[in-house]
Image (spheres, coloured by chain):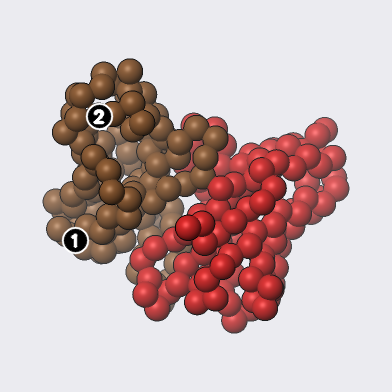
Amino acid sequence: DQQVKQNSPSLSVQEGRISILNCDYTNSMFDYFLWYKKYPAEGPTFLISISSIKDKNEDGRFTVFLNKSAKHLSLHIVPSQPGDSAVYFCAASRRDTGNQFYFGTGTSLTVIP
Amino acid sequence: SQTIHQWPATLVQPVGSPLSLECTVEGTSNPNLYWYRQAAGRGLQLLFYSVGIGQISSEVPQNLSASRPQDRQFILSSKKLLLSDSGFYLCAWSRPPFSGRAYEQYFGPGTRLTVT
C-alpha cells in the first residue's frame, strides 16, 4: 500500500523557469514531510522539510507547500538550473509513532539549458 | 558533524552466496538506523529500521536480515542471495522524533549489488 505517491515519473523544464513537483499522501496522521534529491548511484540528499503546523517553508530557491485538507504537498524550484536535474523524492512521517519515513516513487526532473 | 559510511560501494555476487553490507555512523549517538533498497526504476523500499542496539523491525518479509551490534553500526545480511535481491542498497540515520533537533533522514552513498 503506497501511502505516499508521486504520480509524475518525469518532468522537463527550461532553465530559469519554475519547476513544480507534486506529491500526495493518504495517511492523515502524517505530520512531517520532506523532499530529497538523488543523483544516479548516490544516496538521496535532504533538501527541505515542513511540519504539519505550517503550510509553507522556504529555503533559497526551494519552497515546499503543504495542503493538509487535500493531503498534497509540492516542491517549487525557482529559478530552475541544469544542476537541479535529478530524481526528487517526497517522504512523510508520523512523529508520534515515529521512526519510519514513507517515500514516494520519485520524479525525474530534467532542466533544459 | 555527522557522517555515514557504507561499504562496499559495489558488489557482484552469485546466486546462493551470502551477503554482508555494513553501515556506520559517526558524530551522533543513539541514532535511528534504516536499510532501504531501490530496485531499478523504482522508489525507495524500507527493509529494516532500528531504534537501538539489538532492536530490529522488519518491513518486508524476505531472505534478508539486519543486525545492530553496536549503537552506530547496522549490518544487512543474507545467507543465500536471490536474483531478485539485486538493487541499490541505502543505509540512513535519523535522530528520534521530538528530540529537539532536526528530524530528517541522512543517507549513505549506497551499495550497488548485482546478483548473477
Depth-wise, is mark 1 or mark 2 nearer the camera? 2
Report the residue marked by disc 2. B81
Q: Position of residue B13 (x, y in %)?
A: 27, 21
Amino acid bearing label 2: Leu
The answer to which quarter of the image holds residue A75 is bottom right
Query: Is disc 1 surrounded by few (<14), some (14 to 19) or many (20+) residues within 10 Å?
Result: few
Q: Earlier in the sequence, mark 1 or mark 2?
A: 1
Residue B4 in view (yes/no): no
What chain letter is assigned to the residue under label 1? B
The answer to which quarter of the image holds residue B75 is top left
> Residue at (47%, 58%) from the top-left corner?
A1
Drawn side of residue A1 relative to residue A78, left or right: left
Residue A106 vs residue A37, the one in the foreground: A106
> Residue at (26%, 22%) from the top-left corner?
B15
Report the residue marked by disc 1. B55
What chain letter is assigned to the residue under label 2? B
Chain A palette colour: red
Provide the letter of the chain coloured brown: B
Q: Judge whether B114 appears above or below A94 on screen.
A: above
Residue B72 vs residue A38, the one in the foreground: A38
Q: Position of residue A34 (x, y in %)?
A: 55, 61
Q: Quadrant of the C terminus of chain B?
A: top left
Instruction: State the separation of the CA atoms marked 1 and 2.
Output: 24 Å
* Secondary structure under the numbered disc 1 in the rendered image: strand
